[in-house]
Structures are given as C-alpha cells and as structure tokens.
C-alpha cells in the first residue's frame, strides 16, 4: 500500500489533497503516515481519523493539548512544533504533499526527499528560496519532485515526451487577480478584504492577496526557472482573465502546446498523485463552445512591479530568492495587519532587496540551508524595521 504524508493538510491545497485521497479509497488504498496543520487542530484530527494516520502534527506547541484531546481514543500519535514537523518528514513515505504556506514549508519538504519517493510540491516558496539545493537533494536521493502549482503542472504535462533542448520558451498565464483592471490610484487604497477575493480560484488568503499584487506570479516565474532549468529570458507571463489556459510551451519549430482545464487545483494535485497514470478526477469539463472566447494581454509592470522585481532577483541569483520571498511574506503580514498599504508591499520589498544587495550579501552568497534561513530572517527584520519606523 502506498505510504502518503500531507504537510499543510488543513489548508486549501491540503483539503483538496484530502478530498482526492478519500475519493481514491482513503485508508483502504493509502497508508497515511503523517498529516500536519497549524491552528486548525479540530480539522486536522478529523482528517487524521478519516485516513487513520500514524501521527498528526501541529506547527504550534500551544495547540498540542487541543490536538491530543481531539485525537483521544483514536490511537493516533500527536506532536507539535517545528522540530516535530521535521520528525514527521523523517517517517518514510512514498508520496508527500508539500502544502505548508510560506518559507516554513521548505525544511519539512527538503527533509522528506531523503526517502527517495515523490514530493508533490505546492509550496513554491521552497523553489524560490532554495531551488538549487532542493533539486540537488532530490537528485542525490533519487527522489522525484512533481509540480503542483497549476501553471507548472501544465508545463510539466506539455513536456511529456519532449526534449528540453527543443523548448524555446515557457509562457505561464496569470488571471490578473482581484485588481486586474484597477487604476494605480485606486490600488493605493485597496483593502485586505478586496485583495482577499479572487475572481476565478478559491485559495488560501495569502496566495489570493499575492495574486492581486502579482507577487504570486513573480514567485512562479522564479519557480519556473528553478524547476525547468530554463533561462529567465525565455520565461514569459501572459495575462489571461479566464484562467482556463494554465501555461504554454513554445518549441523551436514554432509550435505552442497549451494546457487547458477548469480552475480547480484537484487537477494538478490528482495528476501528481496518480502520475504517471491519469485517473478520473472530479473536476469540471470545459465546454469551449459555451465559453466562446479566450483572451490574452501583456502584464502591466507599472501597476504590478512584482514581476519586474522577479527578473532582478533571478539576475542577482545566490540568496536573492530567499530575501525576496521573506521580504514579501513580511510585507504581506504588515498589509494584512493594516500597517501598510497595498502598493507599499512592492515598495518595501524593493527597498529591502536593494539594501541587502548593496551590502554585498545576496548574489555572492553560496546557497546552503543555513544561508537561506539567515537571509530569510534578515529580510523579515529589515521589512519589520521599515514598517515600524514608517520608512516605506
Ligand atoms: P493555506 O493558507 O490555505 O494553508 C496553509 C497550510 O499550512 C495550513 O495547513 C496551515 O495550517 C499550515 N500552516 C500555516 N502556517 C504554518 C507554519 N508556520 N508552519 C507549518 N504549517 C503552517 O495555504 P494554501 O493551501 O493556499 O497554499 C499552500 C501552498 O500551496 C503555498 O505555498 C501556496 O503558494 C501553494 N499553492 C496554493 C494554491 C491554492 O490554490 N491554494 C495554488 C498553487 C500553489 P492551519 O490552517 O491549520 O493554521
């Protein structure tokens, strides 16, 4: 029986993964090793009971008593804290879903590669912050990383049977998020509630706001470079409001292979779960005649500077991705807390990147887990200091 673990089981991706595991037989088809979550321990315990997991882990030590109470009588072990997440990743599994949000997802996913199984990677932050490390670790242990981000799953599928040498460009699409058509002046006053509602996708709050600011797409451009090993100049972003074409691969003979599907993450998750096979998935089938038209346009880098920053990060290399992601996460925290405005997020990230680059650190730094963690902490501190003192 296939052994599976889900990191970030209680989140948006985690719930979709749970749904598919249950539909595909639940505890009769999978041996669930570890399920992890954050504060939602009641739901974590429900999932652990339904899948008969060996262990349920909450990231927060102050949630352990509640988790234990919710699991009472089930025989399922409970644990809490960052070290417990690593220990959960040390339990051998054949298929691991990495769906913790943010840089916190890096360490458990990295550790899980040691078993040489499959890491289904939703946590794009892992590739943005430590792409070369993650890919090398996978190669060292004979592990396979399968992308779960819809765009990257789409590219991966378009590349089946193809030679990367024949690839001219990769185009990832962007819905444009909640503020696709908002003028710059209005963006300055955008609220957290407005940024938290996506026109096409139902996702966690943080990635939804990152979609509105295009920071999500910026992370995905870097993710594309790290995962497919393609030159940044050959990665394009195309705004596609309908979110039905997820990505396109352009080949040297001029052919463009597009991947289309309903905006439902269970497609990409199910593909990674069943790879290399395809199984029936509970996703809507597209009726293109009813849809009628698909539209595309170039992204506006003035209103959405995050895409420009991603290019600078790739050009700098080293630990610039770790600084970029951490600064973005800290800026997002400050926006959600009402401390800074929507447009301030990109401003403060750019300022901190410039500061850290001119201090000579980023581009020349060797990428190691320690360096990535130290850079991450420094970038967060710098953003928080600027927010505190109003130096945006
Ligand atoms: P959610 O916010 O919905 O869920 C995040 C999960 O991580 C929850 O289980 C949460 O626990 C847990 N968690 C939160 N903070 C921590 C922490 N510090 N340490 C350990 N666990 C923590 O996120 P999403 O599911 O939306 O996104 C997960 C990842 O997948 C992200 O990297 C995102 O970029 C990526 N992704 C998401 C897509 C989507 O459609 N949602 C699409 C493509 C990629 P709890 O809720 O119990 O507190």
Image: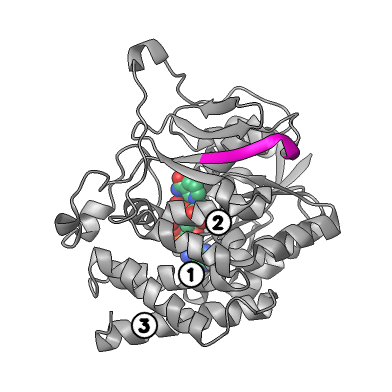
Identified at 35% across, 60% down, the residue is 305
40 relative to 228 in the view: left or right:
left
Mark-to-mark CA distance, 1 and 2? 11 Å
**Mark 1 or mark 2, which has the lower sequence index?**
2
Q: Magenta segment, which residues?
A: 165-171
- Number of the label disc, if any, that sits on residue 222: 2
The answer to whether residue 40 shows anywhere in this view is no
Residue 189: horizontal and vertical position, in percent?
15, 61
Secondary structure, mark 1, is helix
Q: Are marks 1 and 2 in contact (CB under 8 Å)?
A: yes
Q: Where does the N terminus fall, quadrant-wise?
A: top right
Residue 69: horizontal and vertical position, in percent?
51, 64
Residue 6: horizontal and vertical position, in percent?
61, 52
Identified at 58% across, 66% down, the residue is 129
Q: Report the residue marked by disc 3.
A: 384
Q: Report the residue marked by disc 1.
A: 324
Secondary structure, mark 2, is helix
């Amino acid at each position: 029986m296939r052994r599976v673990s889900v990191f970030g089981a209680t989140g948006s991706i985690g719930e979709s993964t749970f749904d598919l595991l249950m539909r595909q037989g639940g505890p009769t088809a999978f041996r669930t090793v570890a399920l992890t979550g954050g504060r939602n321990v009641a739901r974590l315990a429900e999932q652990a009971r339904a899948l008969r997991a060996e262990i349920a882990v909450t990231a927060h030590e102050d949630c352990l008593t509640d988790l234990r109470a919710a699991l009472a009588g089930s025989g399922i072990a409970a644990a809490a804290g960052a070290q417990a997440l690593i220990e959960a990743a040390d339990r051998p599994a054949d298929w691991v879903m990495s769906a913790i949000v943010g840089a916190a997802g890096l360490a458990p996913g990295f550790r899980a590669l040691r078993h040489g199984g499959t890491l289904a990677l939703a946590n794009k932050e892992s590739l943005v912050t430590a792409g070369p490390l993650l890919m090398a670790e996978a190669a060292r242990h004979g592990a396979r990383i399968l992308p779960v981000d819809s765009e990257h799953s789409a590219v991966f599928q378009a590349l089946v049977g193809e030679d990367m040498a024949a690839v001219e460009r990769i185009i990832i699409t962007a819905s444009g998020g909640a503020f696709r058509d908002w003028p710059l002046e209005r963006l300055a006053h955008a609220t957290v509630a407005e940024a938290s509602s996506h026109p096409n996708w139902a996702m966690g709050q943080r990635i939804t706001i990152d979609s509105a600011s295009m920071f999500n797409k910026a992370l995905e451009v870097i993710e594309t470079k790290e995962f497919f090993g393609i030159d940044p100049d050959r990665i394009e972003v195309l705004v596609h409001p309908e979110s039905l074409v997820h990505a396109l691969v352009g080949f040297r003979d001029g052919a463009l292979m597009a991947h289309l599907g309903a905006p439902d993450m269970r497609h990409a998750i199910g593909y990674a779960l069943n790879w290399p096979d395809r199984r029936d998935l509970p996703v809507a089938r597209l009726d293109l005649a009813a849809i009628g038209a698909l539209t595309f346009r170039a992204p506006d880098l003035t209103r959405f500077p995050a895409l420009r920053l991603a290019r600078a990060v790739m050009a700098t290399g080293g630990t610039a991705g770790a600084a970029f992601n951490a600064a973005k996460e800290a800026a997002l925290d400050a926006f959600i807390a009402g401390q800074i405005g929507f447009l301030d997020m990109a401003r403060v990230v750019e300022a901190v990147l410039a500061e850290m680059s001119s201090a000579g650190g980023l581009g020349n730094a060797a990428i190691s887990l320690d360096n990535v963690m130290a850079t991450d902490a420094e970038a967060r501190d710098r953003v928080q200091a600027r927010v505190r003192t109003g130096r945006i």
